[in-house]
Amino acid sequence: MKVEILRSATDDLVEGYRFYEQCSPGVGGYFIDSLYSDIDSLVIAAGMHRKVFGDYHQMLSKRFPFAIYYRISRNIARVYAVIDCRKNPAWIRNRLAK
């Protein structure tokens, strides 16, 4: 399976990096490495995660309180968002509906 990270998800990753880097220098880099590792695992594990908010699959990060939202189409897992799980579920639903 191929994995494609859309611009919206890349922007989410940059935002998370800035947040954690501001909290403690070096943690932002660890955040990025960890989330990209989780996303890379979709090559093998895409489709195994539960569906939420319609056709979106939700994969929880192993090390940070973030969820990766993706859809599968024509053997490609497209990552649409990487969102902090502490956000209001209604906000997440609205974000994914865009």
Image: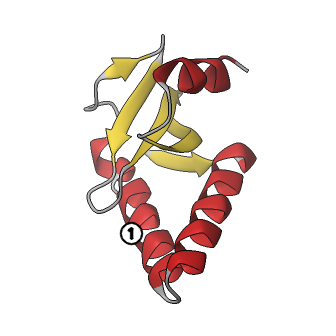
Residue 61 in sight from this viewpoint: yes
Q: Position of residue 89 (x, y in %)?
A: 47, 22
Question: Could you tell me which quadrant the C terminus lies in?
Answer: top right
Q: Is residue 20 left or right of residue 45?
A: right
Q: Which residue occupies the extreme front position in the image? A: 23
Number of numbered discs: 1
Quadrant of the rendering where the N terminus is positioned: top left
x then y, percent, for residue 77: 49, 38
Q: Nearer the viewer, residue 49 or 89?
A: 89
Q: Residue at x 36, y 51 (%)?
A: 65
The image shows residue 93, relative to residue 41, as above or below, that is above
| Viewer-closest of 3 and 95 | 95
The answer to whether residue 75 is visible is no
**Is 23 situated above or below 69?**
below
Q: Residue at the location (41% across, 40% down)?
A: 85
Residue drawn at point x = 59 percent, y = 48 percent: 4
Secondary structure found at label 1: helix
Q: Amino acid at mark 1?
A: Ser
Residue 70: x %, y % from top left: 50, 34
Residue lying at the far top of the rendered structure = 54
> Within 10 angstroms of label 1, few (less than 14), some, or many (20 or more) residues?
some
Q: Position of residue 92 (x, y in %)?
A: 55, 27
Give the residue drawn at x 45%, y 71%: 31
| Colour scheme shown | secondary structure
Relative placement, left or right, of 9 versus 28 is right
The residue labelled by disc 1 is: 34
Q: Residue furthest bottom?
A: 25
